[in-house]
Image: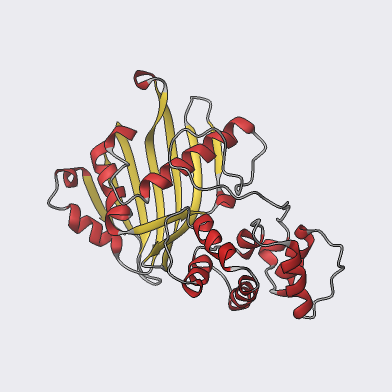
Amino acid sequence: MLSNRETEGLKKILGALEDGDVLSLVQTVSCGQLKVCDRKEAERAILSCTLKPADLLRRKKILRQVLFRYLLGEQVPVEPSLPKPDLIRACLRHWESDSNVAVIEIDDETEAAPREDYPVAAPPEDYPVPANETESMMGFQFAQWFFSQLNSHEQRLGPQHFFTSCQMKIECFESSQGPPQFVDIDGSIGVSSMLWELAGGSRRLFHPNSDSLKCCFESHGLAKVIVSGVIHASGSCVGLFDTMFGLVRDPSAEDNWKIQVVHARLRVTEPFVTACLRTLHATESYGTIKQLQC
């Protein structure tokens, strides 16, 4: 989450952009899921979708000249010839974002419009590229496809994308002080139904943080994709998520990959997992759900 100093600094930087650039940024940071009516709402949406200030500063719309003028106005001494990555580091140091300063290696990027089809030819250009090209492409393609389906206003993430023996485990913190709630779900119908209730069916949006994305292939063929992000509802941030997906090739489906395992840890400000379970109580899929209270 952004600190107060980071938020105020980013507000000033956004305030220096043209209206068209601000509206374009909304579509980029929200994966095309948010529609705004005016500039003020657009700036609020951009900030609510930003986990770390570096995620926003590295966007192509945030020009080097904009960062230099901001730092000059803040009386931060910088050389006029500094490249954009160094100006970003200067902003983060000015905001005392120590956790972000050491990890930035950024070039100007080209922003790509969000895509919904899977597979895609190449990862979106706003994403960093891990060293292993095969694992990189697999992780990017899956994350882009999965979250575009999950956030859809229609139930696109149906049971056909899961093995019938798939399993989902949810660990949910619905209170800062109370114990976590554990939910185990078995079967493709139960898992797809629960995911729909968590996201699209309840008009919540799960926004993955590209910097957290990891993918690796295990020796027996399982592809493991790990990604974290922010949960939004009605234009507000309502929680954080950490997810791990286990993918396995399905030779009977033209050698495509299907989901075998989903592990999710949620930290939310409202008891929506409990609400989802109530909604599913009367459905056939509820018989595959086991709710465990720690």
Q: Return the x and y of residue 57 as percentages of the image width and height.
A: 66, 62
Where is residue 71, by image quadrant? Answer: bottom right
Name the residue furthest left.
282
Name the quarter where the C terminus is drawn: bottom left
149 or 135, nearer to the observer? 149
Query: Which residue is painted at 33% across and 68% down in the image?
Result: 270
Q: Is residue 123 left or right of residue 199?
A: right
**What is the x, y in percent for residue 196?**
29, 49
Query: Is 150 or 267 nearer to us in this picture?
Result: 150
Q: How many numbered marks have been drawn onto this rendered protein structure?
A: 0
Q: Is residue 14 left or right of residue 143?
A: right
Residue 187 shows up from this direction: no
At x 38% / y 38%, what residue is drawn? 261
On the picture, is 12 further left or further right than 285?
right
The residue at the point 57 percent across, 36 percent down is 122
* Residue 173 in view of the camera: yes
Q: Where's residue 260, x and y in %?
A: 37, 34
34 versus 121 height, above or below = below
Q: Where is the N terminus found, in terms of image quarters?
A: bottom right
